C-alpha cells in the first residue's frame, strides 16, 4: 500500500511536537526517524530516547532508519518504542546482515534493508527473501535537503521487477530529495512509500505540503495504527 512518511531529521526541534501533530492531522501516514552515529555518516542526529518520546505521541507508526555502524548491535536499543513500524539497517554497515535481521525481528518490528547510492544493488538483492521492506536511498545518506540522484530510479524499477519475479510481499520505500514535483516519477518507478524530510518539515506550510504529496500518492491519508 502506498504511504507518505515524514522524516524529522531537519525539523526545528524546538517545535517538533507541533510540527508532527500538524503533519499527522493533514494525513501523514508515518514518521521516519533518521538515526545517525557520526561513524557510518559524518554527523550525529539523535538516538532512541528522542524516538521513544515522539513515537509515543505521534498517532501514526514510526519507522527507524539506522545510519549507524554495527546495526546488529544497535537495533536492540529501540525495543519498547511504541507504534514501531519498520527498522531499516544499511547493508553496508552490517558485518552480519543475518544478525541484524534477527535483532530487529526480536523487537517485533518489521525489517527493512537500506542501500546507499554508491553500493551495488546486488548487496540487497540477496537479502530480499528475508526482509519486509527495502529502502532505496536517492541521495547520499546523512543529511536532508539534498537533490535526488535521478539514476537511482532505475534501482526502484529493478527491485520492483525482482519482487514480481520472486513473488515477494516486499515494500519498496524511496528516501531523499523527494518533493511534490518529482513524487510522481518515483511512484511510477515502483516505490510504495515516499520518505520526505525537508519537503515537509523544512518549510512553512506543513499541512499544505502534506496534502500536495498525498494528492500525488492518490491518497487522502488515513492514520494507520
Ligand atoms: C537522508 C535521510 C533522509 C532525509 C530525507 O540521510 O535518510 O530520510 O532526511 O530528507 P529530504 O527529504 O530533505 O531529502
Ligand atoms: Zn531516512
Image (cartoon, rainbow, N blue to C red):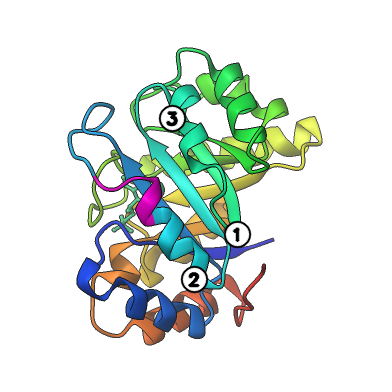
Quadrant in the picture for residue 17? bottom left
The N terminus - image quarter? bottom right
Query: Are circles 2 and 1 on residues that touch, CB within 8 Å?
Result: yes
Q: Earlier in the sequence, mark 2 or mark 1?
A: 2
**Which image quarter: residue 41?**
top left
Q: Of helix, strand and loop, which one carries label 1? A: loop
**Helix, strand or loop for disc 2:** helix
Task: Give yes or no for residue 88 being in the magenta stretch.
Answer: no
What residue lies at 37% left-to-right and 45% top-to-bottom? 138
- What residue would you read off at disc 3? 74
Q: Position of residue 210 (x, y in %)?
A: 43, 78
Q: Is the residue marked by circle 2 packed among few (<14), some (14-19), or many (20+) residues within 10 Å?
A: some
Q: Are marks 3 and 1 in contact (CB under 8 Å)?
A: no
Q: Nearer the viewer, residue 170 or 104?
A: 104
Q: Horizontal placement of 210 versus 187: left or right?
A: left
Task: Please give the residue where the numbered disc 2 appears in the rendered image.
Answer: 58
Rendered image: mark on residue 220: none
Q: CA distance from mark 2 to mark 3?
A: 23 Å
Q: Earlier in the sequence, mark 3 or mark 1?
A: 3
The residues colored magenta run: 45-50
The residue tagged 1 is 83
Rendered view: 194 above or below 124 = below
In magenta segment, residue 49: yes
Q: Residue at x 55, y 57 (%)?
A: 193
Amino acid at each position: 500500500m502506498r504511504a507518505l512518511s515524514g522524516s524529522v531529521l531537519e525539523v526545528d526541534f524546538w517545535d517538533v511536537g507541533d510540527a508532527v501533530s500538524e503533519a499527522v492531522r493533514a494525513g501523514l501516514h508515518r514518521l521516519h526517524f533518521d538515526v545517525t552515529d557520526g561513524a557510518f555518516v559524518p554527523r550525529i542526529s539523535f538516538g532512541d530516547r528522542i524516538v521513544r518520546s515522539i513515537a509515543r505521541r505521534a498517532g501514526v507508526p514510526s519507522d527507524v532508519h539506522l545510519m549507524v555502524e554495527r546495526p546488529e548491535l544497535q537495533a536492540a536499543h529501540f525495543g519498547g518504542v511504541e507504534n514501531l513500524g519498520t527498522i531499516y539497517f544499511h547493508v553496508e554497515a552490517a558485518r552480519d546482515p543475518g544478525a541484524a535481521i534477527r535483532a530487529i525481528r526480536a523487537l517485533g518490528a518489521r525489517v527493512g534493508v537500506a542501500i546507499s547510492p554508491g553500493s551495488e544493488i546486488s548487496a540487497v538483492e540477496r537479502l530480499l527473501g528475508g526482509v519486509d521492506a527495502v529502502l532505496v536511498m536517492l541521495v547520499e545518506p546523512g543529511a536532508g535537503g539534498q537533490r535526488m540522484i535521478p539514476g537511482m530510479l532505475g534501482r526502484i524499477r529493478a527491485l520492483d521487477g525482482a519482487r514480481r519475479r520472486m513473488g515477494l510481499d516486499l515494500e519498496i520505500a524511496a528516501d531523499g530529495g523527494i518533493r511534490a514535483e518529482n513524487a510522481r516519477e518515483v511512484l511510477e518507478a515502483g516505490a510504495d512509500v515516499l520518505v520526505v524530510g525537508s519537503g515537509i518539515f523544512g518549510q512553512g506550510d506543513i499541512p499544505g505540503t502534506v496534502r500536495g504529496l498525498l494528492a500525488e500518492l492518490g491518497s487522502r491519508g488515513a492514520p494507520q495504527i
